[in-house]
Image (cartoon, rainbow, N blue to C red):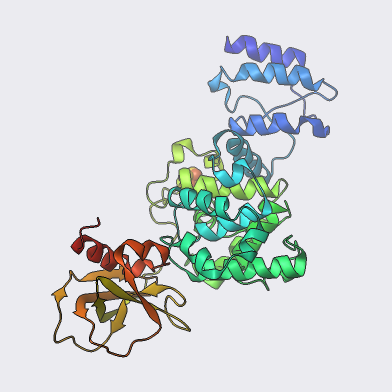
């Protein structure tokens, strides 16, 4: 069977001569070939595209065709890697709501949500958020408290505040349409090099890179980059390599890198056997996938200890509005103090919350309210807690209060 297929190909449209294929209409076929790791193909000029397609379709059944044909369009490594990856992405891309109904607004919201948060977690938040704020105008017109409420549980609340501020500016200054110019984009709140790259490449299909952990992991492995992968020098290296790799279809290529990093080229135990760019990967040849990327040891996190007083008055509990600057600003939470608590009605279980750079260890107490002066906040019934954007750091305390009232 294999011989027969080779024969058909050779006799109908392929010959053993170095013949450049110049017709751009062949591009879809080339992608298909690359995605199957058939790296060498000779194609005679002037052969009809339909003939080649129908013949190549038969190759699906002949997996050991790999490497038996010679493909001549371009033997450049980056070019071949590019087409292998986008070909793989065409078939294996992840289905996500912001891809199913693509929009600039959806791309931006999803990219902000995905910072520091896993896709599986983001999907539900994204759907709920988009239902309430289906357009950037809806988001701009909402009040911040409500936006935070819809963000509640995702953490890193400065992202939500910046998202809201950014929506207002895009509506007022750009009539609701994100600028496509990088200089304008990075002036917007919450939009740094990564998000601007994602908006420009995924939203506008511009030649732009969006360098995140997935991308750096793949690049360090493909090129066996053995220096510190988080250094400025490494970042320049990523930019240089992506400049060469972003050949076409920028939106698709960047998303393909994201998916490859999430599905195949994972941090631990990459699945190189299933990797579409394995033939171009130096790290697998050197058997160093466990060692690359090189990451210098992290500094240990600062641990801060607090007591938390939850004043109780007539079956209501005091929660503070954390106005102004500092951690979790404009969010709600229980009152934190650094001093000791001498008299209390009950002592709850201590909790621990881990931030990016620090750890909070909190001992909470329920204390009868006797008219002490209080910061900005409200006495709230347990059944009304969900109406306030309470920061994740305090959720475990709130949960204990609800439990003590028998509402969980
Ligand atoms: S071959 Fe392995 S290490 Fe190399 S890019 Fe693919 S999954 Fe990553």
Q: Is residue 122 left or right of residue 66?
A: left
Residue 201 seen = yes
Q: Is residue 324 left or right of residue 31?
A: left
Residue 363 lies in quadrant: bottom left
- 310 vs 169, nearest the viewer: 310
Q: Residue at x 45, y 49 (%)?
A: 286
Q: Residue at x 63, y 40 (%)?
A: 86
Q: Quadrant of the C terminus?
A: bottom left
Q: Residue at x 32, y 90 (%)?
A: 373
Instruction: In the rendered view, tell whether residue 13 sits above or below residue 97.
Output: above
Residue 58 lies in quadrant: top right
Residue 366 lies in quadrant: bottom left
- 261 vs 64, nearest the viewer: 261
Residue 209 seen = no
- Residue 200 in percent (x, y) is at 70, 57
- Residue 276 in percent (x, y) is at 54, 38
Instruction: In the rendered view, tell whether residue 320 sits above or below residue 128.
Output: below
Instruction: In the rendered view, tell whether residue 274 sits above or below residue 251.
Output: above
Q: Quadrant of the N terminus?
A: top right
- Residue 296 in percent (x, y) is at 40, 69
């Amino acid at each position: 069977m294999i011989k027969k297929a080779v024969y058909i190909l050779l006799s109908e449209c392929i010959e053993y001569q170095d013949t450049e294929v110049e017709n751009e209409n062949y591009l879809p076929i080339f992608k298909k070939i690359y995605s199957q790791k058939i790296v060498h193909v000779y194609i005679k000029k002037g052969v009809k595209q339909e003939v080649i397609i129908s013949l190549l379709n038969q190759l699906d059944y002949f997996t050991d065709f790999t490497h038996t044909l010679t493909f001549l369009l371009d033997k450049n490594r980056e070019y071949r890697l590019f087409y292998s990856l986008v070909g793989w992405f065409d078939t294996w891309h992840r289905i996500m709501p912001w891809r199913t109904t693509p929009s600039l607004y959806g791309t931006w919201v999803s990219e902000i949500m995905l910072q520091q948060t896993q896709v599986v977690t983001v999907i539900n938040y994204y759907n709920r958020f988009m239902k309430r704020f289906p357009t950037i105008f809806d988001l701009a017109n909402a009040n911040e408290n409500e936006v935070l409420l819809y963000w509640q549980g995702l953490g890193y609340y400065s992202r939500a505040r910046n998202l809201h501020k950014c929506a207002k500016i895009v509506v007022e200054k750009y009539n609701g349409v994100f600028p496509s110019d990088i200089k304008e984009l990075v002036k917007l709140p919450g939009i740094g090099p990564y998000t601007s790259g994602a908006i420009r490449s995924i939203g506008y299909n511009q030649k732009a890179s969006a360098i995140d952990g997935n991308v750096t992991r793949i690049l360090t492995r493909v090129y066996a980059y053995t220096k510190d992968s988080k250094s400025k020098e490494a970042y320049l290296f990523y930019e240089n390599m992506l400049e060469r790799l972003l050949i076409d279809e920028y939106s698709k290529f960047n998303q393909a890198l994201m998916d490859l990093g999430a599905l195949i080229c994972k941090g631990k135990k990459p699945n190189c056997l299933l990797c579409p760019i394995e033939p171009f990967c130096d790290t697998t040849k050197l058997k160093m996938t466990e060692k690359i990327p090189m990451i210098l040891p992290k500094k240990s996190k600062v641990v801060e200890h607090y007591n938390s007083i939850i004043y109780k008055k007539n079956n209501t509990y005091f929660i503070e509005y954390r106005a102004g600057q500092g951690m979790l600003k404009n969010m709600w939470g229980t009152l934190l103090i650094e001093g000791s608590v001498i008299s209390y009605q009950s002592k709850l279980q201590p909790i621990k919350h881990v931030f990016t750079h620090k750890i909070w260890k909190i001992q909470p107490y329920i204390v009868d309210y006797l008219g002490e002066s209080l910061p900005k906040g409200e006495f709230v019934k347990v059944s009304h807690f969900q109406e306030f954007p309470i920061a994740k750091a305090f959720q475990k305390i709130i949960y204990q209060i609800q439990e003590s009232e028998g509402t969980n």
